[in-house]
Image: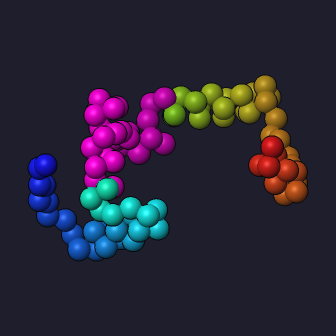
Amino acid sequence: MANINIRIEDTLKKNAESIFSELGLSISAATIMFYRQVVRYGGIPFELRVREPFFSAENQKRLQETLDNYTSGRSKPVKKTLPELEAMADE
């Protein structure tokens, strides 16, 4: 077995341990789970980004197309009441 020593901010450690505890995990178990996922995934098991995805070229293009469709009349706003939206969320 190997030992790993890391330095981490006290507040970050405390907050993470609180969440791990709610999940029934120790910090060691959570760390082992992370390592296993790295091995299974073949890399970091979540997306790492430099920029906010909202400002990505792909999202900006999609937003512009939506705006163009709306301003040209190709699409109309959908108006729903709160109960209708809640019913849709339950589907």
- Residue 50: name its quadrant: top left
Rendered view: 18 above or below 68: below
User: Which residue is outermost to the front?
Assistant: 1
Q: Report if residue 7 is visible in the image.
A: yes
Q: Residue at x 78, y 25 (%)?
A: 74
Q: Nearer the viewer, residue 88 or 29?
A: 29
Judging from the image, the colouring scheme is: rainbow
Q: Report if residue 50 is visible in the image.
A: no
Q: Residue at x 31, y 56 (%)?
A: 29
- Residue 68: name its quadrant: top right
Whether residue 50 is in magenta: the answer is: yes
User: Is 89 positioned to the left or the right of 30 in the image?
Assistant: right
User: Is 63 positioned to the left or the right of 13 in the image?
Assistant: right
Q: Nearer the viewer, residue 23 or 86?
A: 23
For the C terminus, the image quarter is: top right
Rendered view: 53 above or below 90: above
- The percent position of residue 20, horizontal first and vertical second, equals 39, 64
- The percent position of residue 63, horizontal first and vertical second, equals 59, 35
Whether residue 86 is in magenta: the answer is: no
- The percent position of residue 88, horizontal first and vertical second, equals 82, 46
Q: Nearer the viewer, residue 52 or 42?
A: 42
Q: Residue at x 34, y 31 (%)?
A: 41
Rendered view: 52 above or below 83: above
Q: Residue at x 51, y 34 (%)?
A: 60
User: Is 20 positioned to the left or the right of 61 in the image?
Assistant: left
Q: Nearer the viewer, residue 29 or 54?
A: 29
Rendered view: 49 above or below 4: above
- The percent position of residue 58, horizontal first and vertical second, equals 48, 29
Q: Which residues are magenta?
A: 30-58
How many numbered dots are placed on residues in this image?
A: 0
